[in-house]
Amino acid sequence: MAANTRRPSRSVRDSATPDGEMKFTLSQRAHAARVVEIVAPIVPVLAASLRPRTEVVLHDLTRMPHTIAAIAGAITGREVGGPPTDLGLRTFRSDQPDDMVNYRTETADGLVLRSSSMFFRTASGKPVACLCLNSDVHDLERAKEILEALTAIGEPQPGTRGPGSSVESFPSTVDDLADGIIRQAIDAIGVPPHLMKKSHKVEVVRDLDQRGFFAIREAVDVIAQRLGVSRYTIYNYLNELSTGQEPDADAG
């Protein structure tokens, strides 16, 4: 992954409302709209020039979570008005995200992609839009594996897939995005919500916060319902995490 050096990122709460929704000024929204006006017509042309298997996506970050402003060369089945990926959500939550070039990711159904993400910023450096390229290199990866196996001397080369592989989900709706992130956070704890103590629930909220979940509108209400607590309890958990308080392991 290639990245540019930029100022250290601030917490999402420095640029978000109490519900975690990303906050932009009118001038920043106008800048994003201008970027979309100029770049959106280029998206299908760029996708056509990068055929046969490259998806081009333009995100308007001021319209979180419905960020997709233009998309062409469909690989992931998404449409205009759809949400960002889970990786995109984690990246967009930063005030100073780095551009990312030629990083490897994998869809939930095993399709290997080579991706790049470039941000459009205001004069002050605030990111307001992002252009993403997702190229299907699955067949090339398979060809590489076959060539390595055919030319190997001694033991065959190990496969490229393993626990360290990146799997990125490409949800079609905001609800799908939220549900997938919540499921991953709960699975990581290994305890079903109805058996969780407070310490488990705080860890779920910590994981969700790190994944950028609270940038989704009404995220607090959604996770409160899944964990069987009130929205005010979720705010209390977030406050405890921000102040470094340790949760009571025996609390319910």
Image (cartoon, rainbow, N blue to C red):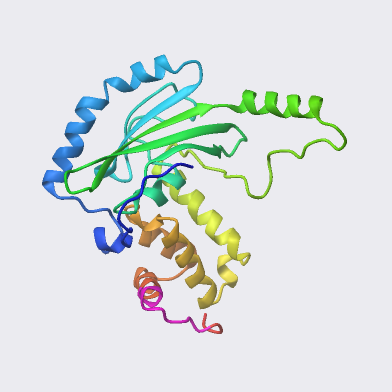
The quadrant holding residue 70 is: top left
**Residue furthest to the left:** 27
Q: Residue at x 47, y 30 (%)?
A: 134
Tell me if residue 2 comes above or below residue 93 in the rendering: above
Q: Name the side, left or right, on which 102 lies relative to 118.
A: right
Give the residue at x 29% y 63%.
13
Q: In this orientation, which residue lies closer to the viewer: 86 or 47?
A: 47
Q: Where in the figure is residue 9, as x and y percent of width and height?
A: 33, 58
Q: Is residue 3 visible?
A: yes
Location of residue 18 with respect to 141 vertically, above or below: below
Q: Which residues are magenta?
A: 239-248
Q: Is 130 rendered above or below residue 49?
A: below
Q: Quadrant of residue 209?
A: bottom left
Image mark count: 0
Q: Is residue 172 magenta?
A: no
Residue found at the very far right of the displayed protein: 154
Q: Nearer the viewer, residue 26 or 153?
A: 153
Q: Is residue 110 left or right of residue 182?
A: right
- Residue sitting nearer the eye, 145 or 170: 145
Q: Please provide percent x and percent y for residue 226.
A: 48, 61
Horizontal and vertical percent for residue 51? 47, 16
Q: Is residue 240 magenta?
A: yes
**Residue at 26%, 62% in the rendered image:** 14
Q: Residue 191 appears at what percent x and percent y?
A: 62, 67
- Report whether residue 16 is seen: no
